[in-house]
Image (cartoon, rainbow, N blue to C red):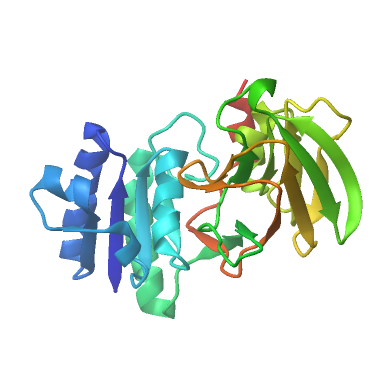
Amino acid sequence: MDVGIVGQRDNARAADLAGEVVELLREAAVGVRVDIQTASVLGLEGTPVDQMRSCDLVVSIGGDGTFLFAAGGAGSTPVLGINLGEVGFLNAVPPEEALPTIRREIERFHETGSIRHREVPRVVVGGADGWSLPPGLNEITIQGHQRGHVDGLNLEVRVDEALYSTAEGDGILVATPTGSTAYNMSEGGPIVHPQIDGFVVTDMCGSGSMPPLVVPLDADLTIRVAGADEAIVSSDGSDHRTIAPPTELAVAAADEPAKVAGPVSDFFQALNKLE
């Protein structure tokens, strides 16, 4: 068994806990890989996160941002989130329960050959000429270089080839249920229960009438972008691509969902922390 560890950057508490996890794994005769920055703090040899895809489990120590980073590199490897943040939609394990939880997952793997997990959808966006961004666990966004109508976009949204809406605004985002409580909510989009299989389409400061729309995961969703010389497409706020309107983008569920390991977080308890 091999386990990857990804700690929150510049967080001494995350590094300390990562060191404790390393000791636990070594005592259990489990292979260990630690992300480069955390490894440098611990005096260990580091491993790029995107090389942890071959691990059986990846442990993320930090907030939801750290989990997104770990999941982006882990691919289809289950990710177990240790919550050092304030909300913890993705990180269900408090730090005081980290070692016992990891120990139980190791025992389960030795008994069954698998890691307990649930699959959550990711969203991917691509252009007509064949490019695509890495899948987003939270959302993809399409917007101008800066917020405000001086750099606004004209947007046409079609679902299964039928026109849903045309709007002018700062941009548009398509969020997963996981991401519905993130950027989507700040733009006025609805909160989606994690058991709902759908994406939320929400405009960003639109001047037209485009209420947020929830579409099935298998919907044929296309977004035509015009009205500016350039626009920026982003995935989870980290991977970016500049496009030249007018152009059409396709948005769909990624072939490879993310896998969230360990216990399920209390969704409504986490929601209460947003208040």
- Residue at 86% in and 61% down: 160
Residue 118 location (% of width, % of height) = 57, 62
- Whether residue 244 appears in this view of the structure is yes
The front one of 156 and 218 is 156
Quadrant in the picture for residue 268 = top right
Residue 240 vs 258, above or below: the answer is: above
x, y percent for residue 271: 63, 31
Residue located at (52% from left, 63% from top): 117
Q: Is residue 121 visible?
A: no
The image quarter in which residue 105 lies: bottom left
Residue at 49% x, 66% y: name it: 116
Q: Horizontal placement of 264 versus 172: left or right?
A: left
Does residue 75 appear left or right of residue 199 in this picture?
left
Left or right: 35 as drawn, with respect to 101: left
Q: Position of residue 192 (x, y in %)?
A: 73, 43
The front one of 11 and 84 is 11
Q: Nearer the viewer, residue 64 or 264?
A: 64
Q: Does residue 45 lie above or below 235 as drawn?
A: below
Which residue is outermost to the left? 43
Screen quadrant of the N terminus: bottom left
